[in-house]
Image: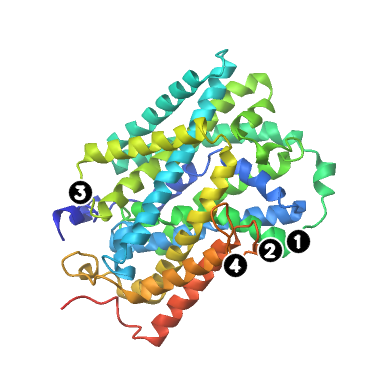
């Protein structure tokens, strides 16, 4: 490999991680208070209490996709989109790689917006009046806090994530225990069953797009540091359980308090709305907890975004890479906070559109690993610019089939897919369609072709 590409393969002496470290990484990355908003959004699909809980379970279990794709990093000791070269070809990988990078910086920006709003609420509680100046100060403070994480290496990041898991996980639980008694159980249990196709499926599709699918692009970035002798089952379980516990609990509370805070799902600042529902003595601790839950998500997004930039062969210094991401993570929040102030509308639109391409990519990567790489591994020649096949038609065609299908069944302010009608109208079911079609096409192409072929190399 070239020197740049060599940096994307974890040296054997650094592969000493244990499965429980992945538990803490993904637990900490899912304790963000927006999980509560997810729960409120589920109820917004006019579902009953039982249907809402089932949707939360299925949505949280979507992290098993991240867990399964993490096994590729365990096997090969390399990052997600380096391994993706074997599936799409070195050059064919550029488009899904770019899409993954856009998703990561987008998530980073979304969380920076949320962190800024949280800081503003905290300052407001301390007596400072809301203003554009306060917004700028809050944005600068939170963005600076995230940029400090670029100084840490993998072992330190694991320790930080472990700290956030214990401390802010416990604080989040305390906040939830105070919120739960506000539930109007009569109203909650009297909600009638909603439409399984028109309500339940779109609800879980939205959650899956924002959790399992969105984080799948970073799966191998952390499992690559695992000892290759570790049990695949333990790695899979650590990732799945680590993410499921906080996700399900947070969404569950969101479902419960949707009766007492009915405008939560539509609020421009959901963090502030939740804070107002708490007793005054708890509000300060709540805002600190909300900030603590956001930081791990930002750290993971920033780290993986920088790795993805390297995989795209954008060869810049570490300092330049940090500056590029700093500009993006500030400029997007500036737009959201000062120009387009409807935060959740932008948030859902972002998830649904990017989720289509990411779902198709994750599906192709998963099937390729399941039917080919799981047994044969990743030959280094498939991953290098010098020797790897430029384009792997099988992966590219499968990805295009799923992505195009997903958009055909999706409508948005920018376009309307011809089949975005009925249950597909104003829903994120295009994400699930993209995943299913890409999986089917990829499996068929592998079975119809030479299933022993590992992607091909140039002679």
Q: To which residue does mark 4 refer?
A: 418
Element marked by disc 4: loop
Q: Earlier in the sequence, mark 4 or mark 2?
A: 4
Mark pair 2, 3: CA separation: 45 Å
Which quadrant is the C terminus positioned in?
bottom left
Q: Pointer 1: what residue?
A: 195
Real-space Cα separation, disc 4 to disc 2, in angstroms: 13 Å
* Residue on which disc 2 sits: 423
Q: Is residue 291 left or right of residue 191?
A: left
Disc 3 from disc 4: Cα separation? 41 Å
Q: Do labels 2 and 3 touch, CB within 8 Å?
A: no
Where in the figure is residue 53, as x and y percent of width and height? Answer: 69, 53
Q: Which mark is residue 315?
A: 3
Q: Secondary structure at mark 1?
A: loop
In this view, 82 is above or below 106: below
Tell me which label, 1 or 2, sits earlier in the chain: 1
C-alpha separation, residue under disc 1 versus residue under disc 2: 10 Å
């Amino acid at each position: 490999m070239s020197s740049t590409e060599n940096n994307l393969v974890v040296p054997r002496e650094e592969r000493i991680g244990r499965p429980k470290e992945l538990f803490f990484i993904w637990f900490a990355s899912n304790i963000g208070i927006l999980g509560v908003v997810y729960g409120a959004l589920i109820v917004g699909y006019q579902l009953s209490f039982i249907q809402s809980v089932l949707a939360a379970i299925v949505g949280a279990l979507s992290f098993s996709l991240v867990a399964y794709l993490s096994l590729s990093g365990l096997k090969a000791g390399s990052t997600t989109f380096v391994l993706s070269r074997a599936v799409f070809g070195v050059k064919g990988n550029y488009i899904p790689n770019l899409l993954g990078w856009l998703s990561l910086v987008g998530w980073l920006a979304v969380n920076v917006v949320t962190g800024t709003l949280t800081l503003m609420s905290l300052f407001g509680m301390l007596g400072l009046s809301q203003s554009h100046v306060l917004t700028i100060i809050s944005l600068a403070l939170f963005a600076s806090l995230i940029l400090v994480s670029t100084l840490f290496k993998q072992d330190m990041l694991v320790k930080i994530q472990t700290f956030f898991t214990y401390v802010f996980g416990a604080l989040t639980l305390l906040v939830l225990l105070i919120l739960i008694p506000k539930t109007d159980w009569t109203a909650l249990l009297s909600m009638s069953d909603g439409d399984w196709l028109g309500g339940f499926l779109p609800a879980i599709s939205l959650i899956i797009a924002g959790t399992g699918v969105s984080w799948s692009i970073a799966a191998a970035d952390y499992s690559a540091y695992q000892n290759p002798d570790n049990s695949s089952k333990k790695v899979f379980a650590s990732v799945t359980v680590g993410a499921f516990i906080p996700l399900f609990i947070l969404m569950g509370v969101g479902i419960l308090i949707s009766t007492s805070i009915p405008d939560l799902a539509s609020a421009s600042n959901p963090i502030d709305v939740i804070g107002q529902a708490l007793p005054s003595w708890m509000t300060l601790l709540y805002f600190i907890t909300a900030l603590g839950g956001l930081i791990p998500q930002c750290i993971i997004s920033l780290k993986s975004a920088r790795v993805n930039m390297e995989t795209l062969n954008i060869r810049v210094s570490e300092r330049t890479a940090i500056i590029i991401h700093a500009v993006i993570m500030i400029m997007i929040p500036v737009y959201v906070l000062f120009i387009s102030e409807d935060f959740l509308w932008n948030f859902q639109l972002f998830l649904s559109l990017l989720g289509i391409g990411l779902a198709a990519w994750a599906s192709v990567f998963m099937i390729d690993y399941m039917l080919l790489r799981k047994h044969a591994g990743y030959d280094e020649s498939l991953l290098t610019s010098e020797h790897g096949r430029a384009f792997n038609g099988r992966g590219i065609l499968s990805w295009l089939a799923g992505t195009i299908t997903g958009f055909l069944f999706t409508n948005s302010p920018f376009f309307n897919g011809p089949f975005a009608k009925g249950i597909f109208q104003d829903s994120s079911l295009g994400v699930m369609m993209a995943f299913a079609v890409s999986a089917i096409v990829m499996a068929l192409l592998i079975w119809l072709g030479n299933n022993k072929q590992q992607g091909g190399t140039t002679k």
